[in-house]
Image (tube, rainbow, N blue to C red):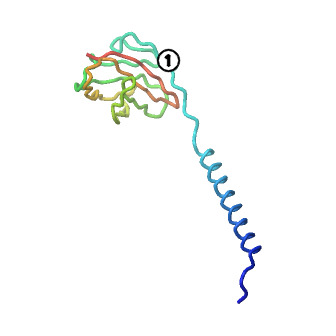
Amino acid sequence: MKALSRRQWQFIALALLVFAALKVALIVWYLQQRQPAAPAVTSISCSSLQQGCTLPDGSMLRVDSIPRQRHPFTLTLGKHGSEAPTAEFSMRDMDMGFNRYRFVDGGDHWQARITLPACVSGSPDWLLDLRQDGHIYRIAFRAE
């Protein structure tokens, strides 16, 4: 068996490097193609969730009682779209863990039974991120 010369080894090394670079470039391209663009977050001004808030699509969002930490309340959303919306609660600059709620069909509206997570800081300022039909609406509210 004939031994490979130095020039042949160099050619094999170069071919392997070109192959590795091509593979990395294809993986990067593939991952960029698969990531959908994140929808923009639209901030909604709402003076009172009990009185109701009108979203840009015309649907009304309201609660049945004043939101309180660790006390369940019902969040109702006028039916708009065919896909069930979700609601997630957080605080500014504070991770509240996973607490996403999926609305269920209530006939002419969507509804979800919500329990706000406990907050050790005692802050009443909450953010509700409502995901509906590819949109994210952020609503700031105060809990008791």
Residue in view at x 62 percent, y 49 percent: 28
Q: Which residue ends up furthest to the left in the rendered image?
A: 71
Label 1 sits on a secondary structure element that is loop
Quarter occupied by the N terminus: bottom right
Q: x and y percent of residue 18 in the render?
A: 71, 61
Quarter occupied by the C terminus: top left
Q: Is residue 30 above or below residue 99?
A: below
Name the residue nearer the viewer: 74 or 23. 23
Instruction: Examine the image and state in which quarter residue 7 appears.
Output: bottom right
Residue in view at x 72 percent, y 73 percent: 9
Query: So how many labels did they put on this image?
Result: 1
Instruction: Examine the image and state in which quarter residue 96 appears.
Output: top left
Name the residue nearer the viewer: 3 or 44. 3
| Residue labelled with disc 1 | 58
Name the residue nearer the viewer: 132 or 128. 128
Q: x and y percent of residue 74 in the render?
A: 30, 24
Label 1 CA crowd tier, 10 Å (few <14, some 14–19, many 20+): few
Name the residue nearer the viewer: 126 or 82. 126
Q: x and y percent of residue 33 in the render?
A: 63, 45
Q: Which residue ends up furthest to the bottom in the rendered image?
A: 1
Q: In the image, 112: left or right of 83?
A: left
Mark 1 is on which residue type? Gly
Q: x and y percent of residue 129 in the render?
A: 42, 26
Q: Is residue 53 above or below residue 79?
A: above
Q: Which residue ends up furthest to the right in the rendered image?
A: 7
Residue in view at x 37 percent, y 31 percent: 103
Q: Which residue ends up furthest to the front in the rendered image?
A: 6
